[in-house]
Amino acid sequence: MEIEFTYATLQDLPKIVETYNATIPSRLATADLEPVTALSKLQWFNSHNKEKRPLWLVMYKGEYAGWMSFNSFYGRPAYDGTVEVSIYIDQKYRGLGIGKASLKKAIEVAPALRINNLLGFIFGHNEPSLKLFYDYGFEKWAHLPKVADMDGIKRDLIILGKNIQGPTTGKSLSLFE
């Protein structure tokens, strides 16, 4: 297989941060306005684990191409079955289907991790990411107009969601019902 996923280790944090920082100038994928450091992302890194909140490296033909993570939503126990999916692909690997493979992987592994809802927090002007998530059955669950100030330009945040049938509930749960 050309695209594989491996669990990230602490030694991978610098390249994860490098990939993340490379997206900052575009003002499409993150609300950070200045580069971050590996040290500043250490707590974030440590909040991930294989059992509930994985952080994967995305490998293309054996080479590092980006990363994907599940992040807890809102930090309260009742929301434990809901995660935000983050996907960051290195510039030279974009357009090769890696984002699609990553989102497919997220949907496939969610039930085993007792995740009922996947969320994507995407800027309203990030049309490629919105299209990707919509193509995989995500729906608009929230629209937060002009909540991000990107160099004096107010940007909308769209929250897309997809309900995943959980293995232990026997029923679907929806976050914003």
Image: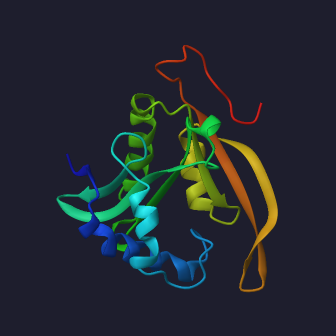
Query: In the figure, residue 32 lies in which quadrant?
Result: bottom right
In the rendered image, the quadrant that contains the C terminus is top right
Indicate the position of residue 4 as horizontal and vertical percent values. Answer: 25, 49
Indicate the position of residue 26 as horizontal and vertical percent values. Answer: 56, 79
Indicate the position of residue 54 as horizontal and vertical percent values. Answer: 38, 48
Furthest-right residue in this view: 145
Asked whether 15 or 98 is in front, the reply is 15
- Residue drawn at 51 percent across, 24 percent down: 166
- Residue drawn at 39 percent across, 35 percent down: 109
- Residue drawn at 72 percent across, 61 percent down: 157
Is residue 138 visible in the rendered image? The answer is no
Vertical side of 36 occupied by 100: above or below: above
- Residue drawn at 49 percent across, 56 percent down: 86
Indicate the position of residue 53 as horizontal and vertical percent values. Answer: 43, 46
In the rendered image, the quadrant that contains the N terminus is top left
Furthest-top residue in this view: 170
